[in-house]
Image (cartoon, helix red, strand yellow):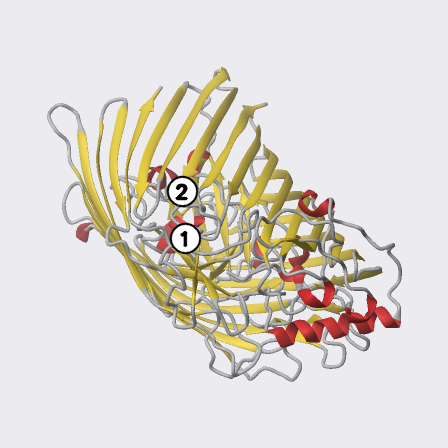
Amino acid sequence: MAHTFKKAGRATALLLVGSVVVPAFAEASHSLSPGVSTPAQVQKRAHLRKIVEASGASSAGNSAPVRMHRRGHRPAISEGSGILAAGAMAPAPDTQIMVTAQKRNERIQDVPLTIAVLSPEQLISSNRTTFKDYLLQVPGVSLEQGAPGRSIISIRGVSSTSGNPLVGFTIDDVPFGASTYLGLGNDLHPDLDPADLASIEVLQGPQGTLYGASSMGGLIKYVTRSPSLTQSSGHVELDGSAVAHGDAGFSFRTGYELPVIKNVAAIRVSGFYRREAGFIDDPSQGRTNVNDSRAYGGRISLVAHLTDRLKLHAGALYQGNESNATARVDTDVDLDPLTGPYQHRRLPGTDGYHSEVQFYNLALDQDFGFATLSSLTGYTHTDFFAPQDYTQQFGYFIPLLYEGSNVGVRFAERSRVRKISQELRLASNGNHSISYIAGLFYTYESTKLTQGVVPVDAVSGNAVPLDPALVATIPQTYAEYAAFVNLTYRFSRMFDIQAGGRISHNEQKFVETDTGMLGGAVLPGSSRGSPFTFSVSPRFHLDRGMMLYGRVSTGYRAGGPNTSPPPGIQAQFGADKTRNYEVGLKSEIPRAHLTANFSAYYIDWRNIQASMTDPTTGFSYYSNQGKANIKGGQVDFLYRPLAGLTIAGSTAYTDAEIAQNSTAGAAIYTLKGDPLPYVAKWSATGTFTYRWSLSSGVKPYVSASVAYTGARHTSFVATSDLPRLTLPSFTTVDLRMGADFSRFSLTVFAKNIGDERGYVGADAIQAAGPFALTLITPRTIGMSLSAKL
């Protein structure tokens, strides 16, 4: 059917942001010449804003006004503190878990904060190789999945579906990911395959003193493998699995390391390919298992002892991820599927994503005897593209812009981030009455975000000869400078105090260019801020195996500029901050073969970055509004009653609530006491593992684990008459058995053996429904085989 554009009068504009015109809609693009917005153009934008709001369209999983640059959707291991994750294998009885949480190598039981450590080897053997698999095994950590390729992670209830990032990420102590919402920093994360990782550390609570912005809820640290300077070794791994209600998946991993010059330099090379099985069908397209995904990549690393006191560590990593669709099922307000229990309906060519990550790092360590000077340089290059079906969201105004009944809407989004960082730090050596870490930090980010609302054929999803409604391009720069110090003073063998502070300064600039039928605007903006964070941690060593600690720490996420703020609205919003009060006990009781840790905390979150709506123009913007209070606790244990038998568990309680009613003009409706989104009040994990040896030298083992995630509330809504969903609790049980031979290991695993139907994200297709809910992976049964080379 031919389509014609309805001229003038009824055309209005959406507020979008973006960067490069995406190839998927470039051929349909017939842009207007950019220029400064006229009063008439502003009035058109405001008019369409009100039309969209009246239609109930929502791009964010709630009914907040459409604000494209905040993201298309808002989707919401731990044997615990000081213990390996429940989804991973416990350490051998004669070994200690070492972590780098405080930027130096320490026993985990000596670090005054709650940490979960994940073993990559055990994640691979149990087929838990992505965020959606293993973070759900960490009590106190929430994962909200929704829009293609994206997820929002929150720790200890510090949860928000808008604004800048809340959880930080590092790879070998180098920060990863964008620091701003314009770079999609809140929901694009390094979901690295465990193939070349030594460990994954999850630090709970604000980490602003040592790690700076975006770690106000906590931090996830990837620690990569280093090659041996003395011997060559390699491995190859192959696994296959079948998913209930879906198809089959498989993965292949290999790596090899060797000394280039023995005791001087060594190199390691690794690679992997992984296909995740699909289990969602799309009857509108006549396709099955549409949410299958692929991941592939590799890494090369070099370690060299240039002198007796100067060491070099360099690495280069590449990873690609892609999927044809999400694991979302369409439901009504009662969570009943609209078609089938594993089905959704999407416009062809939408609901998938493609991403690529390149990461390079160089570390130099010079030992001066009294202290070690370290230089850490990093460069990150990420590209992300995800087209989404917005036909229902914007269906109300399609007839206002286009003639014809077969017009669909594709929302196409591309993000590009280039980030360089440099840290120089000096850390004292030895065990003295005073120890310290002091450093300087710099990072510069260049991001480019492109978003467009594009008309397509409603049946085929193909491009049609019509102009896009709007294409927005926003290049942005972010620069941050910081200085930090952390001191420990030992009053005696039993008592010491850690104290530290960090002063930062950031500057941000952007220029938004709107083109398309409703474009014609060039909108610059900028912001700056200088936050300060601190931490104080007294430690009481009651005996060698027991430590009582307290901790007061702060975290922040950077503020930023408002894109095209309405008249009279501030051009920038400020940083919000958390202050964490925590007490804990870490204990090891060798005679009882027991390790047990306890922690309790209270978090005061103020000046929360909130989306607001101007009542006159209908434009949305960010402001610092409101506060939240979070209180909780966690208990972790690891028990070895018999040789080869390990029982471990962790339980977390998190009570996260809004502390005051929402203010006038807020884009969300909240009352004091409303729970924060996607935070389970209770979560728990438990693991049973038994290993033994046969006379032949074969070492069999069996393992069972259980994980519980409590009920969670979805994103806030715009008004009191709109539904805010409650996702029900769910429990998964995994089984694993296998044997280690001299050179080979064989594992048979079953995940989610009860085929539990758990939801980990929800987006409103329209404000009052229907909804798109993200499912956990159904029952999966498979086998893994690995060999040493």
Q: Is residue 9 visible?
A: yes
Q: Which mark is residue 135?
A: 1
Q: Identify which residue is drawn at 53% across, 56% down.
A: 147
Badge 2 or badge 1: first in the primary sequence: 2
Q: Is residue 637 visible?
A: no
Amino acid type at mark 2: Thr
Residue that extends furthest to the left in the rendered view of this protein: 695
Element at label 2: loop
In the rendered view, would you say 587 is above or below 441?
below
In the rendered image, residue 462, in percent from the top left (x then y), is placed at 63, 47
Q: Is residue 726 left or right of residue 178?
A: left
Element at label 1: helix
Q: Is residue 378 left or right of residue 142?
A: right
In the rendered image, residue 587, in percent from the top left (x then y), is placed at 30, 57
* Quadrant hosting residue 55: bottom right
Amino acid type at mark 1: Leu
Given residues 661 and 167, the one toward you in this image is 661
Q: Which mark is residue 788?
A: none
